[in-house]
Every structure is written in C-alpha cells, then in structure tokens.
Image (cartoon, helix red, strand yellow):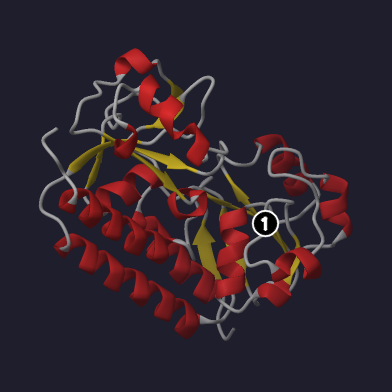
Amino acid sequence: MNATVRITDAAGREWRFDRPPRRVVSLVPSLSHTLAGLGLADRLAGRTVYCTQPPELVESVPAVGGPKDPDVERVLALQPDLVFMDMEENRAEHAGVLLDRGVPVWAVLPTSLDDVARLFAELGAVFGIPDVAAARAAALAACRERASRSWQVPIPVLCPVWRQPYMTCNRNTYIAALLRECGFQNIMDEASERYFRFETTMVPGGRDLRVLLPTEPYPFDEEMIPAVAADFRVAADQVFLVRGELLSWYGGFTAPALATLMDLHQFILENVTDT
C-alpha cells in the first residue's frame, strides 16, 4: 500500500490504514467467505464456527465461538490488527471490549447492493488489492445489469427467516434488496421494523404469492414445505427452498445469488397456472 487509506464503517467510526492488515479475525461468515474469495484467506487468523465457506477455512483457521458468543479473550490472544463485525449478527458489547483493548473493529451493515459494491472497493483499497476487488465489483455490476433486463413483472413473495415464531424482514435489508433486484416484491416491505415477528393471518395467501424458504438461519427443509404452505394458505408448489447463503450472505455470494434468483423468477413465470 503506497498511501494511507481511510474508511468510515457502518458504526460511523473512521479508520486509518497505513498498511494492509496482516492478522484478521472475522466474526461474520459472509465476510470470511468474501475475504477468502479475494485471495485473503492467509490473512484470516480467526473465524466463527459458522464461517465454513469455503470449506478449507475450517481446517486452516481456528474458530473463536459463534457470532453472538465469541470468546473475546481468544480473539485477543490471536493478536489481530483488525476484526470484522456485523452490526446485526454480532453484539455491541463484544465490539466494545475489543475497542477498549485497542483492536480496530470494522463494522458492516449492507442494506443494498450498492453497499456490497462499496464494500468490495473498500476491501480492495485497505488490503492493497484494488484490481482483484474491482474485478469482483465488475462481475457484480454485470449481474445486476442482466437482472435489470431479466424481468418485467414483479412476483409477490414472502421470505420467512425464522419459524415458531415466524419472522421476516422489511425493505431496508440486504435480503429485500436482493429480491427486489431480481423482480421479487417482498410483501412485508412496508413494515416499520427491519426484522420482526408476524402472524400468519397477516399474509394474504392466494395463487399470486410465492414463499421463499432460506435454509438458514432457520433450518427450513423440503419436509417443512407442506406445513409452511398450510400456514400461509398457499399450494405446496408455491413454496421454494433456497440455499440460505444465497439470500443472506453478502459479498462473495451476491453475484451467484442474483443468477439463482433470476433463474427462479423465470421458472415461476414459465410455470404459472390459473388453477
């Protein structure tokens, strides 16, 4: 790195980097995957137990607990010069301890695909790999451009992220932004809270609605589809299981998610019936 790089993170903290970080702890699965995809796996000194993509991280990088309950002393023992945290996945109290001990904590909270593109640019600048990061950002931009031309008719969807109780998200979330880009209209967009509990009676049902079930954070699976369909008064063929990382892991998974969702949108349109 030939020049000092300054960034302002999602918590409003300004960080100055005079050289690329060498020892990084990521408490965010999305970012562990993204850093590895940018060729920075050798910089990862620690990860959470859920940072399992790519799989080789499990063998090469020690785990320090979960996003909600990291072993902060173990994080400190790894002597990181940077820790990544997400403002929703991780807890402010753990960030506070690290900050008090002099460890920079880069907080993220992407709520749009523009935020993801900006994150690639910032990572490229901070880690001294602008060309690699720019290539990823360009690939994302190309996927977004294809997505904008791939649909004309928005499809109403509900995307539960939890069950018992059911929870979902409003428009000010990465999940909703991703769906919107590919022609899906989140029926809960106008809710006042970003993530919230809801009753099944709030869902209109009907043949126009599709339900997308991510396999995480709640472990929805094929066997649950009939029960979920009954809960929301839709047919089982209106419920689709989607790999959880594609809906909620930003960064390296964003472009593949766009491709998958574009395919799903087209499949639904081609298989619409009046029955």
Residue 200 position by quadrant: top left
Residue 89, position as x, y percentages in the image: 59, 41
Residue farthest along the front direction in this orientation: 275
Q: Is residue 182 left or right of residue 236?
A: left
Amino acid, disc 1: Cys
Residue 272, position as x, y percentages in the image: 16, 44
Q: Residue at x 59, y 76 (%)?
A: 127
Residue 124, position as x, y percentages in the image: 51, 75
Q: Residue at x 31, y 48 (%)?
A: 179
Residue 143 position by quadrant: bottom left
Residue 126 seen in the current view: yes
Residue 240, position as x, y percentages in the image: 37, 43
Q: Is residue 156 left or right of residue 65?
A: left
Q: Residues within 10 Å of mark 1 (few under 14, many from 20)?
A: many
How many numbered markers are drawn? 1
Q: Above or below — where is 25 with respect to 23?
A: above
Q: Is residue 240 left or right of residue 15?
A: left
Residue placed under numbered mark 1 in the picture: 51
Q: Residue at x 14, y 32 (%)?
A: 275
Q: Is residue 90 left or right of residue 249?
A: right
Residue 194 seen in the current view: no
Q: Residue at x 68, y 74 (%)?
A: 41
- Mark 1 lies on a secondary structure that is loop
Quadrant holding the N terminus: bottom right
Residues 34 and 157: in front is: 157
Q: Above or below — where is 212 with respect to 195?
A: below
Residues 108 and 143: in front is: 143
